[in-house]
Structure formats: structure tokens, C-alpha cells
Image (cartoon, rainbow, N blue to C red):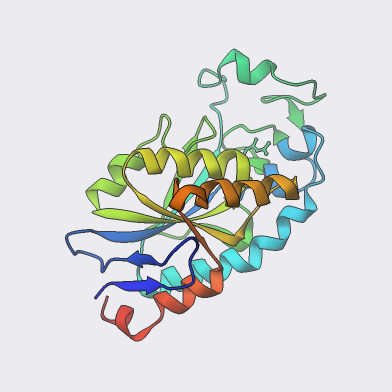
Amino acid sequence: MAIRINDAFPYPYVIPQAGSETGGVALVIIDMQKDFVEPGGFGEALGNEVTPLQTIIPTIKRLLDTFRALGLPVVHTREAHQADLSDCPPSKLKRGNADLRIGDDGPMGRILIDGEPGNTIIPELAPITGELELTKPGKGAFYQTRLHDYLEERGITHLVLTGVTTEVCVQTTMREANDRGFECLLVEDGTESYFPAFKKATLEMITAQGGIVGWTASAASVIAALTSDEMKDL
Ligand code: TIU
């Protein structure tokens, strides 16, 4: 039986039963890697104060625990480049005026390079067996990854999005997903930005015009809906 998040914004978000004609739902956790949420990584190299991003960790963990308990799919992404930087366009490498750039040696290893200590997902949210951990060279999680195929193969049509940063990798991913036909909900307290005003603006622009890109809701609303009696049949 489908269930509804009645207090989603701008109107109720309906999550279909897994395996039904309209598919199922997955949790997508964007770039909760040390590079962005701990000092010494890419986020700090760009001039940001990173600790505000840590406030969402317990909230995402509650969502993660709920999806795991229900046996629902979870996708983790990391913004990462290959060691030889062959997947990093020169425009991305050169952008800005940071002292530490992508590929440079930083306090947590080479900045934004796959396999380096700073590029790992924070331990609180570390993937477990059966969950997809994707590296992505861009801001969006669909660009040069197998995410679309992975979701299609599993009949997933609805995405619950979390992670960092709201207006960069999360919003880009949500827009990519929306264009590919996925019904997307961004968890209000499961995403964060270095710029509070940008987070607020992102939530507003996504849901404006009747949900032009999708929905938002609190983690508590998502968890309550997922653990309602109807979903126990999943
Ligand atoms: N700088 C910034 O806000 N974000 C990124 O560079 N990547 C992600 O959002 N993951």
C-alpha cells in the first residue's frame, strides 16, 4: 500500500510500495565525506567554516537506520577524482584562488582524490554491505556514474535526498534526478550548506511553482511515514 507524507511541502508526497507499478524508494546520501565536514579538507580549502555541516549527522543517521531496518535501498556518494586527475576537467581544477587545490597534499591526504583519508565517508554514516557507494567526478550524482542504471534496475522511482552541500551537490543531483523522471524529496534537516541563506533559498526554489523540482519534509515526517503500519508490509 502506498503511503503519504502529509506534511511534505508543497503538498503530500506519496511513496509507492516497493515492487508496485510505480516502483519504490531509495535514500540518497550525498557526499558526507570528511572532505566537506571535517577541517583540513576541500570544504575548508575553499574558505568555508565546516563544523556547521556536522549538525545533520545524527539526523541522517536516523534516516539511515530506518531505511536499513526496512530493507530499503541506500545510495552513498562521494565527490572524488582519480589519482591521475584524468576525470577532473581543467576548469574545475583551476577554479577559485584556494591555496590547496584538488589533488594537492592536505592534512587528510590528497584533496578530493578517491582512496585518500579525507575522501572517505564519515564513520557515523559509513556504508554497509549491500549499499551502493558511488564516486562521482561532478556535482551531480548522475554525471558519469551508473546511478540511473542502478535505480532503474531496481524499479526505484522515488528518492529521499540528504547530504551536503544543499545548493551545490545536493541540488544538482535533485535537478538531474527530476529531469530523469524521479520523484524527489529533500529532507529539510538532513541537508546543510556553508551558507544558511543558500540552504533556505534552495528549499524555497525547489518547492516553488507547485514543486517545480520536488518536495521537502522533515526527517521526522519521513521516518513516521516509513514506519507507519502500511509500510510494515514491505
Ligand atoms: N563547495 C561546496 O559547497 N560543495 C562542493 O564543492 N561539493 C558538494 O557540494 N558536495
Q: Position of residue 214 (x, y in %)?
A: 44, 51
Would you place residue 22 above or below residue 228 in this image? above
- Whether residue 41 is visible, yes or no, is no
Residue at the far bottom in the pictured view = 229
Q: Position of residue 1 (x, y in %)?
A: 24, 76
The quadrant in which residue 234 appears is: bottom left
Would you place residue 25 above or below residue 102 in this image? below
Is 6 displayed left or right of 44 in the figure?
A: left
- Whether residue 205 is visible, yes or no, is yes
Is 230 displayed left or right of 111 in the figure?
A: left
- Residue under the point 57% across and 25% down: 83
Count the marks: 0
The quadrant in which residue 49 appears is: top right
Q: Nearer the viewer, residue 139 or 179?
A: 179
Residue at the far left in the pictured view = 21
Would you place residue 55 above or below residue 93 in this image? below
- Residue under the point 41% across and 67% down: 12
Is 47 displayed left or right of 207 in the figure?
A: right
Q: Position of residue 22 (x, y in %)?
A: 22, 58
Residue at the far front in the pictured view = 209
Q: Position of residue 111 (x, y in %)?
A: 69, 32
- Residue under the point 56% across and 40% down: 169
Would you place residue 209 above or below residue 4 in this image? above
Is 135 displayed left or right of 131 in the figure?
A: right
Q: Quadrant of ligand 1?
A: top right
